[in-house]
Image (cartoon, rainbow, N blue to C red):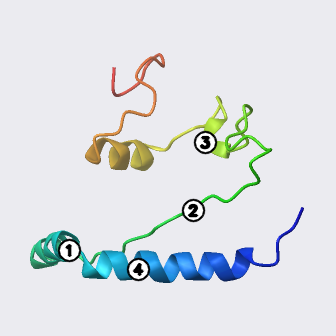
Amino acid sequence: MQDNRVPALLKRLIVVMKSALAESIEVVRVVEDIETCGFKVMLVVDAIIQPFEQPLWSSTPSSPASDPNLELSTEDLSWLKSLRIVPNPDQPNSPFS
């Protein structure tokens, strides 16, 4: 069942969340600290809206990241390692094992 109010409510949610972040002294301070280190900050807020009758997360992943045959380049692995992310430490010949 489609509710015509949802788009307006989503816009309102975005406005309220932006306002809450902008008014948070702690958020502002941390953003300023990051910027003084020479980085730009872009805060991204996401919301998933789904009818109550449907499960929020599907039991079958449909993301390409869930592909067990995903191949990563040397640059990909290097970048992930710089972020301290271990893509698959159990994989044979993994540079992280």
Residue 40 occupies quadrant: bottom left
Q: Which residue is mark 1?
A: 31
Residue 6 versus residue 15 in the image, above or below: above
Q: Which residue is mark 3?
A: 65
Relative image position of residue 15 (x, y in whole percent): 48, 83
Q: Secondary structure at mark 3?
A: helix
Q: Earlier in the sequence, mark 1 or mark 3?
A: 1
Q: State if disc 3 and disc 2 touch (CB < 8 Å).
A: no
Residue plotted at (26% across, 81% down): 23
Residue 36 left/right relative to 48: left
Amino acid carrying label 2: it is Ala
Give me the disc on residue 18.
4
- Frontmost of labels 4 and 3 is 4
Q: Quadrant of the N terminus?
A: bottom right
Residue 81 left/right relative to 27: right
Amino acid carrying label 1: it is Val
Q: CA distance from mark 4 to mark 1?
A: 14 Å
Q: Earlier in the sequence, mark 4 or mark 3?
A: 4
Q: Quadrant of the C terminus?
A: top left
Q: CA distance from mark 4 to mark 3?
A: 30 Å
Q: CA distance from mark 2 to mark 3?
A: 20 Å
Relative image position of residue 50 (x, y in whole percent): 72, 55
Q: Which residue is mark 2?
A: 47
Amino acid carrying label 3: it is Ala
Relative image position of residue 14 (x, y in whole percent): 52, 78
Amino acid carrying label 4: it is Lys
Q: CA distance from mark 4 to mark 2?
A: 13 Å
Residue 81 versus residue 33 in the image, above or below: above
Q: Secondary structure at mark 2?
A: loop
